[in-house]
Image: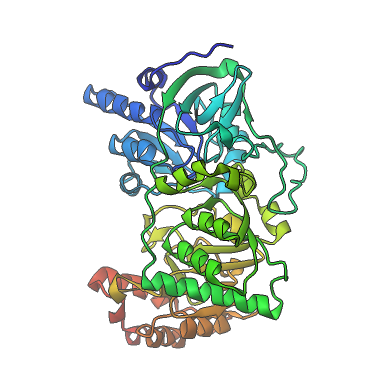
Amino acid sequence: MAYNFITAEEAAAMIKNNDTLGLSGFTAPGTPKAITEAVAAKAVKEHEEGREFKVNIFTGASTNPHVDGILAKANAINMRAPYQNTPDLRLRINAHDTHYFDRHLSEMAQEVRYGFYGPINYAIIEAAEIDEEGNVLLGTGLGNGPTYAALADKIFIELNAALPKSLYGMHDVVMLQDPPYRREIPIFRANDRIGKPVLKIDPSKVIGIVRTNALDGVKPFTAPDEISKQIGSNVVRFLLGEYKRGGIPKEFLPLQSGVGNVANAVLYDLGESKEIPQFMMYTEVIQDAVLELMKKGKCTFASTCSMTFSDETESELFSNLDFFHDKILLRPAEISNNPEVIRRIGVIAMNTALEADIFGGINSTHVLGTRMMNGIGGSGDFTRNAYISIFSCPSVTKGGLISNIVPMVSHADHSEHSVDVLITDQGIADLRGKDPLQRAETIIENCAHPDYRPLLRDYLKLGKGGQTPHALQAALAFHTEFANSGDMRNVDFAKFA
């Protein structure tokens, strides 16, 4: 069929107040670049003329300045899920200008299909190509695009000329059946393919194609600082120790790694280690460091939902697709983050925490227990099902004013039941097989900063017994002291005795 090519403004004119938009992509890659900017401009005009205008935004994960950034500035988002990382949107969420519900990334697509969150009025899908029969060659990030396209009343395509057609074959597009008809997911190694190279959509639902020409706009990560390097070194030291003692099979196991400087430092150290063998990745995001590992021959394959590369690295990828084509496979989020697959193939999960408590609980999302930072993302998908679950964080932040090892986390995202190993710049706490008191002693001695170890020991002495000897009257004393004086080191546990 012949498609209708329109402008982003013409697309935005069709979108009404309180419509729900399902967007392709996962982090910046694969997300819209034009239509959402036009929606933001429409919102500004509507607000100036005294009319209410907000839309609901469902994605695969975080997005980019063209989506969350500009829409948040325009106060144009009513409801948002399942993950975000944009400063302007974070301000809206914490001010209750935007309703945000934080979901495990593997669950979002199926819950939309179950009808939990209402209908999808429009899907906006970034593509490298679309043919007359509705076969869509997707871009560098999938997210929940297949589900949103299937359920949407109408579809907009952003046809991005910056995406090469030679991406064909790097996607593994599949949408699971829903219970009670769901079958097993036949992935037994990270490089198993189970779906199709294109997304099949109903061409009659495509009401407009908007032409774009833009890379994803991901900025390069800064070089890891000394703290990140030390954490990375400790993670690799732990993995190497496990490998040498036989705790990891001789073939090694696929790795999952989050995004950021610590993750980059870990991947860099893995590439430098001559004792760790070649490995594959089964993860939700790969970043610049993974491409370097592939060039070195260290990482042989990466299954992912998104290629979150800086523009420079993305250009390098596109210029050398013959080399990378058979080494990267892009999947929808409910496959890349699927608990069934993660547990079956033995993924080693490496995620970051905002804070950890001395008994092994993890806060990934809320600063001082109240203010949303980004969201839980895929950490829960991986940590609950990993072969080994590793969490890492700096021992202190803000020059030592904040200890990231606390008596009790101020917001619980992952309980101690899901955490095998905690690693900071100070060292490694292997928590497997330890009771709560043993975990506390191990974390204090190995992961807490020396400035805070005496205070944490003092807290333990306040405990009145029980298997997990919390002193409830003082459990959040670190946080309340920071709120009062700006320095957690000023806490005085003697007053709680």
- Which quadrant would residue 461 be assigned to in this image? bottom left
Does residue 422 appear left or right of residue 182 in this picture? left
Image coords of residue 401 (percent x, y): 29, 74
What colouring method underlies this structural image?
rainbow
Q: Nearer the viewer, residue 93 or 474?
A: 93
- Asked whether the viewer can see residue 287, the reply is yes
Image coords of residue 425 (percent x, y): 43, 76
Q: Nearer the viewer, residue 106 or 47?
A: 106
Is 160 placed above or below 439 here?
above
Instruction: Give the mark count.
Output: 0
Does residue 140 appear left or right of residue 451 in this picture? right
Does residue 418 appear left or right of residue 352 in this picture? right
Q: Residue at x 61, y 34 (%)?
A: 168
Image coords of residue 249 (percent x, y): 72, 70
- Asked whether the viewer can see residue 476, the reply is no
Is 366 placed above or below 128 here?
below
Q: Residue at x 72, y 54 (%)?
A: 189
For the C terminus, the quadrant is: bottom left
- Which quadrant would residue 10 be assigned to in this image? top left
Q: Residue at x 66, y 53 (%)?
A: 339
Is 485 placed above or below 154 here?
below
Q: Residue furthest top?
A: 2
Does residue 418 appear left or right of residue 341 in this picture? left
Q: Nearer the viewer, residue 323 or 100?
A: 323
Image coords of residue 236 (percent x, y): 55, 73
Q: Residue at x 52, y 30 (%)?
A: 128
Q: Nearer the viewer, residue 436 or 449?
A: 449
For the N terminus, the quadrant is: top right
